Image (cartoon, grey):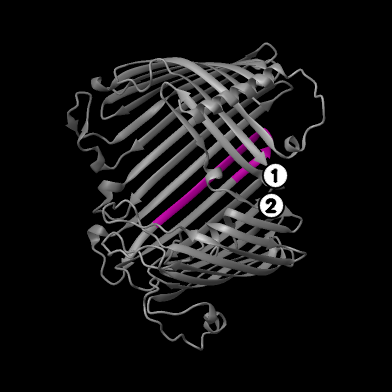
Amino acid sequence: MNQALSTLIFSLLWGSACLVFGQAAPPEKAPSVFSKYVKVSGGLNAYAGFYTASGIAARNQPAPIGLSGQVTITLPQGISIPITAVVGNQGASYSVRQPFNQFGISPTYKWATVHAGYRNVTFSPFTLAGHTFLGGGVELNPGKLRLGAIYGRFNNAISGTLADANVLPSYGRTGYAVKLGYGKPGNYIDLTMLRAKDDSSSIASLPQSATQTVKPAENLVVGVTSRLLIVKYFIVELDAALSAYTRDLRAGEVAAEGSNPVVRLFGRFYTPRLSTQLTQAVQASIGYRDTWGGLKLQYKRIDPNFQTMGAYYFQSDIQSYAIAPSVNLLENKLRLSGSYGVQFDNLANSRNVRTGRSIGSLLVSYNPATKFGFDLQLSNYGISQQAGLRPVIDTLRLAQNNLSATANLRYTLQKEDVVQSFNLTTTYQQLSDLNQRTAAQTENKNLNANLSYFYQQTTTGWGFTGMLTYTQTNLPVAATLGLPDSTGIPKAGDGIVRFYGPTVGANQAFFDKKLNTAFNASYLINKQLGVTGRVLTASLTGNYQLAKRQTLNASLYYLNTDTGITAQKFNELRGNLGYGISF
């Protein structure tokens, strides 16, 4: 054990001892300024146990034992520094977790917020959208004004080497973003701009390879974001952006189109080059909502290769339309909602094929009383392909339909000190392949049903749960060929896999609920290709409250697995006794 770890463990033990033996001592003086603004919390846990297994190689120490501790130092403005230490016969570790390694604060006072350190800030979905930077910034919202600005380092400079292909080089990147808007949350309009640029001299120039084609880049994005509430019932949402992305700063300069108003307005912030691409993204919706229900229309288009250095990932080259109606009936006891949309790609007609998708969903929720309710959810997802630059080969044509339906029925009985609940959930899924040449490899069906019962006495702490589970999967025809039976010899089958069995549990509290015990067990059967497998699990746990901040816990776990194949039978038994104290 190294010195740092020893010091931390000693500190944790000393703090715990001071807490235990000093709980009853009254304070002799008022809290210091340090204790008023700096809070220290944490805990210490010790455990010892046993483990045994047969039929497989041991997956744990036969007698695990260890000590762990954690201390969290909380500073003003929500700054948190968690420190942990673990030592035992399975190894030791000492760490200060990531929030300390990437330190950042965002204190707020009235309508002003200041950012410093490592921060994630979002101005709009298509400009600055949560990218981590190291630097500073400010957001000001006096009255209806909405102002924001940030500046910092977006990427570290990493020099890769040809000798180590796992190290991907990257240029050092800095950037800034500004926001100017007017309105209140839920009813505003913002104009945003982001500019970021790589430092071409931040890393040594390396020969390019097939896997490493890093080039210094530059990006300017301008956008508008708005959420407008019109005559109380209409909501208009708009996010749009225009991105000028230069993929290689070493490319030659070109003359920009003077007739483009965006170029005329923002041209002074950017230098167009031969590697510059101008793309745009927009998503908009208009919705109407009243007490009876609502209706929403949505549109999205993101050009191929649209990028912003203020976000990590964008799904580009898509265009979609959607409609989402909803209605409330029977004094809001019956609610119906749904949506239908279509989406397709290959907007520039540059791909070999064009892929189209259609998505539909329906949700029915009926709650005539607090003790009874029923939900039905349907969804249908379809995908198909059309010819793009080249005709689609029939054997490779993608044309599938995925249907999913879920029904949930619940019934609750609640008395003064007893709560009972019944729940039945059924789910059906079916993947249909409309291409007969590939259907044998893809088509499948799945059915799942769960019937559960819950009983709890609030005064005595006695409770019981029971559940029956049944799952049936019809595998693709091709997937059933070559699977082994109980003798280990591959053979063909009907492709039906069944998984079913009961699960039971019970809990009881003792000694004025200071001792809480629980027992859980399940016996699940799996049948496939004439092979029957069984899995038995059981656990017994107990937790005793020794004092206000001290607990004693014990647990016992048993696992018995029989897959139906002799070489795959095994069982495990493990137990654990632990003590914990918090401060």
Predominant secondary structure in magenta? Answer: strand
Q: Which mark is residue 54?
A: none
**Disc 1: which residue:** 76
Percent of width and height locating residue 154: 50, 60
Q: Residue at x 27, y 64 (%)?
A: 207
Horizontal side of 170 relative to 143 (left or right) equals left
Residue hosting label 2: 107
Q: Position of residue 51 (x, y in %)?
A: 40, 16
Which quarter of the image is occupied by the C terminus? Answer: top right
Write the start and end of the magenta stretch as one range.
365-382
User: Furthest residue to the left?
Assistant: 489
Q: Is residue 448 visible from the viewing direction of this image? A: yes
Res 313 quadrant in image: bottom left
What percent of the width, then of the height, locates residue 215? 36, 67
Q: Residue at x 43, y 65 (%)?
A: 316
| Tag 2 secondary structure | loop
In the image, residue 491 above or below residue 119? above
Q: CA distance from mark 1 to mark 2?
A: 9 Å
Q: Earlier in the sequence, mark 1 or mark 2?
A: 1
Q: Is residue 102 magenta?
A: no
